[in-house]
Image (cartoon, grey):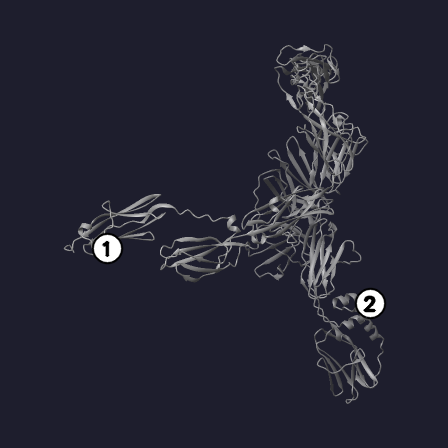
Amino acid sequence: THTRSLAKIKDGLKASAGSAVCVSYALFCCICVRKRFCDFHEHNLLNVRISQTSFALQCFVSEPQSTQLTGLFVEKPKSNVVAVAGSDVTIIAKVDSSTLTRKPTMKWLKGKWLDLGSKAGKHFQFKETYDRNTKIYTYEMKIVKAVPGDAGGYRCEVTAKDKCDSSTFEVSVEGDAIYVGFFAYRDGGEDDGELDFSALLKKPEKEELETDVWELLKSAHPSEYEKIAFKYGITDLRGMLKRLKKMKEQPVKHSEAFLKRLESCYTVDKGKKIVLSCEVLDPNAQVKWLKNGQEIKPSAKYVMEANGNVRTLTINKANLSDDAAYECVVGEDKCSTEVYVKEPPITITKLMDDYHVVVGERVEFEIEVSEEGAHVVWCFEDQELHKDKESSKYRFKKDGKKHTFIILEATLDDIGMYHAWTNGGHTKGELEVEEKELEVLQDIADLTVRATEQAMFKCEVSDDTVTGKWYKDGVEVLPSERIKMTHVGRFHRLLIDDVKPEDAGDYTFVPDGYALSLSAKLNFLDPPKIHLDTTGNMVSQNTIIVVAGNKLRLDVEITGEPAPTVVWSKGEKPITETEGRVRVESRKDLSCFVIEGAERDDEGNYSICVTNPAGEDKAMLLVKIVDVPDPPENVKCTGVGEDCATIVWEPPKFDGGVPIKGYLMERKKKGSSRWTRLNFDVYESTTYEAKRMIEGVLYEMRVFAVNSIGMSQPSLNSKPFMPIAPTSEPTRLTVHDVTDSTCSLKWLAPEKIGAGGLDGYIIEYCKEGGTEWVQANTDLCERQGFVVRDLPVGEKINFRVVAVNIAGRSPPATLGQPVTIREIVEHPKIRLPRELRTKYIRTVGEKINLTIPFQGKPRPVATWYKDGKPIDPKMVNVHNSHVESILFIRSAERDHSGTYELVLQIENMEDRATINIRIIEKPGPPQKVRVTDVWGFNAALEWEPPKDDGNCEITGYTIQKADMKTKEWFTVYDHNRRTNCTVSDLVMGNEYSFRVDCLSLEHKRNPYKEKDMTCAPKFTQPLVDRTVVAGYSMAISCAVKGFPKPKIVWMKNKMIIGEDPKYLMQNNQGVLTLNIRKPSTFDGGKYSCMAVNELGKDEVECKLAVRGETQR
């Protein structure tokens, strides 16, 4: 064979010398000698068409994918499928669904992830069939007119709930062209299975020489101007073309002043330096440099130099403002040039990303460039995209350096490569658009119909634009007069009118362009039929009347194939009993329903339902049980007379199923058991007046209902009633009071009440001239007075009062003339209580609660003032009613003192009442109490009144004295009105203390309660045992309390110690001391002290031991 050597390219670099590639005329095999884990994981055979002798290969590495298969396939596709270019090829797979709980799902994939279901159409076609006998699904994939691009690795994958299985196979496409077969190692990219080497087979681009833009524009055709401007970053193309045209129009003149003129144009990059140079004839000639006709002054930016005949202009750090026409002037002669400042090329800083969307989604390709305001050209494949041409579909957006190309709704025609070009950069992104996966929202259901009925198959898919075809047993269904196919939105329907037996079969709906089919079956069966005999005891169709206690037997003929199932039901409850009082008996072609001894509860709606696979039939029966009626209800006496009574009752709730003919009445005396029939012909009304009764005797009544079946049980006895005449009318009806909406009436009891007594009164009113009386009270009024409320203002109303007892209503008592409903005006008047007419005095802390009654109509407005100002509600609480006003102070303070005024006002009429309230407290002590003089047995005292008088007058003073020895106080003057006094009967030589207390009104209101200090004697400190030395004086002591002052008795060995001079007894404010002068051994023993007063006594004791002097 013919063999050529190739250079292997890996990741754009030459492979090492250790690797070799051999190319055969029929087959090229690529073998890597140094195999590594990163280069080889699995081998897949691919076929790629060769268009050039030199090519490049790309190798991709992927981890092997492991899937636990469950063996669902009954038949898998062949591992190698060979197809001829231009011909069709079919791949078949079969799946067993006998062990599956739901329908399996099949996916056909190319490579590792490309779902071919989205490619379904003219090129890829999918079919699914199901065998109900073997429960095997058959899946077919057909490639129409295979092309070399269809070659590659494929996989079919079936899933069913938690089970999964897959099978891989290769497809090879043979033809006249030369193909390359090799082992590739892929990463499962989006071009998996369809490798494209066109980009790698292109020749490398050669570096272009830098070209002057002005020269390029001069020699270029006008149609190329825009391309040149975009490539070289010209923003003001129109201005540059004007300058170019001007340059072309200027003829080349012979100059006497210039040896060498300026170049026709100069080009400089932005930010660089440029030198404009020319030669003049006269080395001493002075030149001027002009920019757009304006003279240029020398500066750091513009440097002008003269070197012999050479004149130069240097422009430092050129910018866009330096892009202009420059002239060098010598006298009357000049030469000009154009300077073009090129901007740096625009680069792309953020590249375009690839997009993978479904049909209808929005796509946004976004890039970022190095400069704002840059010109970006967007292309689809080799076609430039313009906003004006595709404005309805494409959008172009600029935001600073960010440029965005937007496709509003992607379609399958938008699949391809999109490019973004600037004059200094290029990026591209690929757009993959998949069709939306078609979802079945509602599947077709099996149908079972009878002859002449309509059959309708209906399904719902997710896309309302999808069309499809209907098939019956694999044959396409065509529309006719009987068969109609509709497509409304997402719903597809197949309607078959007047169904015939030949319409039975399997129906399938196949959506166009999708590997999907929906199947259902149409069954044609003979439905069951109920033949109901409506003669005999049926008074009307489907209604049966049975007298209670009789037997009902109903035989119903049933037809249908197969034999239908019969179900009898009462209401919603089926009857399944075959024995008993109510039962169902079954025979061939006959069903019997039996009720033994019909009861009232057996009445109701009965149904018989027969079903078989072909359908069902149902009949409704109304079984009506007739019987004697229930007894009448609520028998009562509504009115009595002297020898008669009116009886009413309610019809029975159950009339026995037939109309009530009338009633029979009976009566008896209370306590008797003998009933007397009052009528022998049926009485049709429910109100009856019983006559010829004895007044004052209690009676009871009962009623029977009668229909065509018989007479009911008697009703319950009525409440006992007594024939008696009603009372006479109430007397002396008068109007007590009238307001704008009420009227108060009073009356006296009837003169004649009788044996029936009096239950109460009914008050009624009627407008003058009217005839309709309205009852004012809902319950009987037991009092002889009533206030009628909610009356219209200004109307004239008639009133009447009726007495009611067991006999009924008495004649009414009426007023002589109508009453006008209008409030009677009464002047306001305050009825001030007697105790408030004088000064009202209370002590601090007391509660004040003043109730001031008043009168007046209409209701007066009560307002309180204190010292001429409105009362403060925070200090005083006020509550007003329509008859009184209450002023309440919870805890009185001295600030509450003042003059309170109550103003009662009705419109322009008013009444006033004044109350003086004084809050007092205990005054302070008198000031500067002093003794002014002492003589004999007398002492003169003076003092000043207290600073605080307690808000009341000082009525006097109480003066007390105390001897400093006893310190007991005694009252000298109980009520002294002056601020001085003389104290007499003093003991000469004694020292006294005096005190003065103020007397006021507060003392009279709260007199001082002296604390009861009386108590029985009690020792607070006991005697203590002592041991003393003879000849040395000693003392024993204790303490006692008690009032009145107790008498003290000292004892030795229970013997009272008298006036013995050896002992000295002392009492100092309750501290008792017994002194023993120079005790001897004879003085030892038990000493005790006893205190006695009128309330009791107490005693303490101790032991005294006296040691002799020798013991010392």
Disc 2 residue type (three-letter): Pro
Q: Quadrant of residue 938?
A: bottom left
Left or right of 585 in this view: 480: right
Q: Nearer the viewer, residue 624 or 915?
A: 915
Whether the residues at callouts 1 and 2 have beta carbons within 8 Å, the answer is no
* Residue picked out by circle 1: 1034
Element marked by disc 2? helix
| Residue type, label 1 | Met
Q: Nearer the viewer, residue 414 or 821?
A: 821
Around disc 1, counting alpha carbons within 10 Å, would you say few (fewer than 14), some (14 to 19), or many (20 or more)?
some
Q: Nearer the viewer, mark 1 or mark 2?
A: 1
Which quarter of the image is occupied by the C terminus? bottom left
Q: Position of residue 852 (x, y in %)?
A: 63, 44
**Residue positioned most to the bottom:** 284
Residue farthest left in this picture: 1110
Residue 823's x, y, as percent? 74, 39
Q: Residues within 10 Å of mark 2 (few under 14, many from 20)?
A: few
Question: Is residue 3 shown above or below 606?
Answer: below
SS of the residue under disc 1: strand
Q: Position of residue 1065 (x, y in %)?
A: 27, 52
Could you give the CA–CA distance between mark 1 and mark 2, rounded to whole angstroms? 152 Å
Q: Which residue is mark 2?
A: 222
